Image: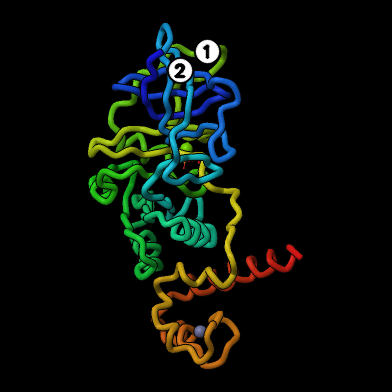
Amino acid sequence: MEFAQGIIISVIAGYYYVEHAGKAYLCRARGKLRLDDLPPMAGDMVLFSPGPDDTGTVEQVLPRRNYLLRPAVANIDAVIIVLAPEKPAPNLLMADKLLALIKSQGLSALLCINKADLGTQAARELADIYKDAGVTTVICSALTGEGMGALLAAIGGMTVVLAGQSGVGKSHISSRIAGKQLELPVQVGNLSAKIGRGKHTTRQVSLLPLPGGGKVADTPGFSVFELEMNSRELQLYYPEFSRSALCKFSPCSHIHEPECAIKQDVEAGQITKTRYDNYVKIYYELVEKEANRY
Ligand SMILES: Nc1nc2c(ncn2[C@@H]2O[C@H](COP(=O)(O)OP(=O)(O)OP(=O)(O)O)[C@@H](O)[C@H]2O)c(=O)[nH]1
Ligand SMILES: [Mg+2]
Ligand SMILES: [Zn+2]
């Protein structure tokens, strides 16, 4: 039998929506299908056998270029961290952890400061905190449409994942920038075929096509995730720490060592205090985790 190649655009309750040649197929997986010890996930390229009425069976998951867990999404180029100046109040500690995670995975990071309509000044101040953090920043409003063109331009043809706290506007942004959503096959049981576009909290990942050729994955966010890295590694993901070669000690954690160039930069206002303070918090969280491991 001939298999077709497609991409999983959403996983709902054990069903896989597979896109192939501009059409979506509602698929089950053949047996306990796993790759890298994980079940199929959104973004996976798969071989499937199409059946009647736009149904099908996923036969094989093709090798993944990369993937993230919680939310599970594969083969991505960049993660967009969405923040809002208020409603909800920005959780910068989480944004900084996400940024480190993204960089440690070798992915690009974009920062999207949404809800600019609630306060332009506050949005600019947020953007300013990240000006040297090695992240492209776009200020926008999914409500007014401001900045959506700039966001699309920054995405280019990439496959991107929206991340960030619940309520920052991830689903509204993806609705704004995505092209026409595929007609999804008939619902099965009480499955809701309306994915990713509701007013309500998003419960699963869904991949939508972008006019520029890329794709955007709306997600339930990254509210629960553990940063898995060595405490010493953390500083590698801070482009702001560019003068670390000038520290007296090597390695230097840039926390308690004397004659530390990074601490001097913080005092001189060269490095954003918020970014540095969160670095210290994350560093100690990682140290504590290492201590508990033994
Ligand atoms: N003022 C304003 N409100 C917005 C904007 N974007 C989204 N909202 C509102 O913010 C609320 C949450 O938006 P969602 O898009 O559902 O947020 P989300 O990040 O997808 O939330 P979860 O799915 O729970 O993670 C909704 O009431 C939106 O109307 C914006 O640019 N400006
Ligand atoms: Mg949502
Ligand atoms: Zn130092």
Judge whether residue 74 can be spotted in this image.
Answer: yes
Residue drawn at 35 percent across, 52 percent down: 116
> Taking 70 as reference, is 73 left or right?
left
What x and y, as percent, mark residue 46? 43, 28
Q: Is residue 99 above or below residue 281?
A: above
In the rendered image, residue 193, in percent from the top left (x then y), is placed at: 46, 20
Question: Residue 34 falls in which quadrant of the image?
Answer: top right
Q: Are marks 1 and 2 in contact (CB under 8 Å)?
A: yes
Element on which disc 2 rests: strand
Question: Residue under circle 2?
Answer: 26
Is residue 197 visible in this depiction of the protein? no
Q: Residue furthest front?
A: 1
Mark 1: few/some/many CA within 10 Å (<14, 14-19, 20+): few
Pointer 2 local density, CA inside 10 Å: few below 14, some 14–19, many at least 20 = many
Q: Nearer the viewer, residue 49 or 174?
A: 49
Q: Going by the picture, which residue comes out furthest to the top?
A: 52
Which is nearer the eye, 39 or 26?
39
Q: Is residue 231 above or below residue 90?
A: below
Q: Amino acid at mark 1?
A: Val
Residue beneath the point at 36% across and 65% down: 134
Of pointers 1 and 2, the one earlier in the residue sequence: 2
Label 2 sits on what residue type?
Leu
Say which residue label 1 marks.
188
